[in-house]
Structures are given as structure tokens and as C-alpha cells.
Image (spheres, rainbow, N blue to C red):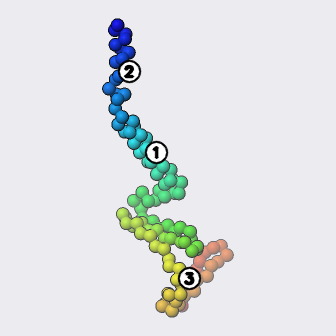
Amino acid sequence: MNSRFRRRSLLNSSEDNDPMSVVSNLFDVAMVFAVALMVALVSRYNMTEMFSQEDFTMVKNPGKENMEIITKEGEKISRYTPSGNKDSSSGKGKRVGVAYELENGDIIYVPE
């Protein structure tokens, strides 16, 4: 008779009747997955500079229509996207010098 009661007590344990234990376990798994995904994305796109203490400037898509300049100074991160309307800035400046590119890739600026 004792073995019969033991079987029932094993089948009716209090842990099996708690439906929230499954939800909490799924939440823990989802959090671990989200953190792992964030670490993988940061390392894949070489964005580890965002977490360092050093200031930096990064240019995304240089020379293209969708170019962006991202600057980090201390805790402040700013993003600059040049406007596509280049005619609006013409005539507002003056020529101050000439820049020459040498065969080895160096650029020399000669002020006027």
C-alpha cells in the first residue's frame, strides 16, 4: 500500500501544478537569446567603439547618396546626414586654396 501512495505523491507534486514556472523559464531563455544576439550584431558590424571611452568619428557609405557621419564625444553620439540639395550652398563661400593628390595617395593643400 505504501508504494501506491508514493506513486501518487510523485505524480501530484506541487512543482508540476505551477503553470507560471514554464513562462518564467521561457522568459529566461528569451533574455539570454536577446543578449547573445546583441553581442553578435555589435561584433559583426565592428561597432565596439560605441562602448569605449574614446571619442571617434565614423563615416558610413563614404561618397554615396546615403552617406552618414557618426561622431561620439564623451557620452554624446551625434549623427549627420548631408543634404542632397547641393545647389543651396553654392555662392556662400570663397576659394581659399587648392588641394593636390600625389601619386602615392597623399593630399597636399596649398593656401592662396
Question: As shown in the figure, which amino acid type bears the numbered disc 2?
Answer: Leu
Q: CA distance from mark 1 to mark 2?
A: 32 Å
Is residue 96 in view? no
Which residue is disc 3 drawn over?
A: 109
Is residue 3 in view? yes
- For the view shown, which residue lies furthest in the top direction? 1
SS of the residue under disc 2? helix
Point out the frontmost of discs 1 and 3. Answer: 1
Question: As shown in the figure, which amino acid type bears the numbered disc 3?
Answer: Tyr
Q: CA distance from mark 1 to mark 3?
A: 52 Å
Where is residue 112? Give x, y as percent: 54, 90
Q: Residue 69 versus residue 6: which sits nearer the camera?
A: 6
- Going from N to C along the chain, the mark reached first, 1 or 3, is 1
- For the view shown, which residue lies furthest in the left direction? 14
Q: Residue 38 versus residue 59: which sits nearer the camera?
A: 38
* Residue 94 vertical placement versus 18 (above, below): below
